[in-house]
Amino acid sequence: MNYIIVLPEGVLNSEQRANRISEELYNITAPLAIQQPYQHGGKVFGIIAHPDGVQHALTITLDYPIPVHPQATLEKLIALFTELTEEEIRALSAYVLNSQEFPFAAIIPSTTTVRTQEYMEENGWFTDEQEID
C-alpha cells in the first residue's frame, strides 16, 4: 500500500481535496453525465485521516488501472492541481484522453511525493482505531 498526503489548497481543506481528487479519478471512468444515482460520489481510492484530524491521505495503488470513458473530461481534476504547468496540463490531458486505460502512477504530478506504509507508520498516521473511508 502507498499513500499520497493531500495538502489543503485554496478553500479546500486536506479531507475535502482528497475526496474530490478520488471522485474526479472515478469520473474519468464514469463521467457525471452518464452516472446512475448509485454512482454519485464514487471514489477510486480510500482516504485516511491522521490522528491530528487535519491531515488526510489517499490510499493508492500505483498500478491501479483507470479505464477512460469516451466522454471523460479532466477540467475538474486538473483544477485540483494548481501546481501543474500549462505544459504538464497539456501532456496529462493528451495522455489520458487518448488512452483507453492507464495506470494511476502515470498521472501523478511530479511535485507529488508517494509515501510508503513504513513512512506513514513512522510519522504517526496509524493508531489501533484508524479507519479507512
Image: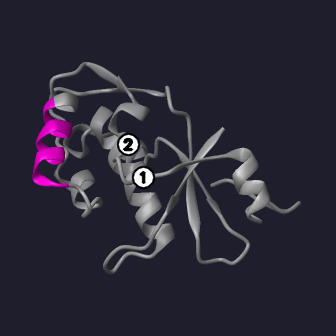
C-alpha separation, residue under disc 2 versus residue under disc 1: 7 Å
Quadrant location of the N terminus?
Answer: top right
| Res. 73 in view | yes
Q: Secondary structure at mark 2?
A: loop
Q: Nearer the viewer, residue 128 or 34?
A: 128
Locate residue 40, reporting x and y percent: 38, 49
Inspect the image, locate mark 1, and give the three-letter code of the amino acid beneath it.
Answer: Thr
Q: Which residue is mark 2?
A: 108
Locate residue 33, reporting x and y percent: 19, 43
Viewed as shown, does residue 111 lie left or right of 126?
left
Q: Quadrant of residue 71?
A: top left
Locate residue 98, reporting x and y percent: 15, 23
Viewed as shown, does residue 59 lie left or right of 19?
right
Q: Residues within 10 Å of mark 1 (few under 14, many from 20)?
A: few
Q: Are marks 2 and 1 in contact (CB under 8 Å)?
A: yes
| Res. 41 in view | no
Residue at the image position 19 percent from the left and 29 percent from the top: 95
Q: Is residue 90 magenta?
A: yes
Which stretch is magenta?
85-94
Q: Secondary structure at mark 1?
A: loop
Inspect the image, locate mark 2, and give the three-letter code of the amino acid beneath it.
Answer: Ile
Which SS type dominates the magenta stretch?
Answer: helix
Q: Is residue 27 magenta?
A: no
What label does residue 95 carry, if any? none
Viewed as shown, does residue 97 lie left or right of 67?
left
Residue 48's place in the image compared with 93, above or below, is below
What label does residue 112 carry, if any? 1
Q: Residues within 10 Å of mark 2 (few under 14, many from 20)?
A: some
Residue 92's place in the image compared with 52, above or below, is above
Residue at the image position 15 percent from the left and 37 percent from the top: 91
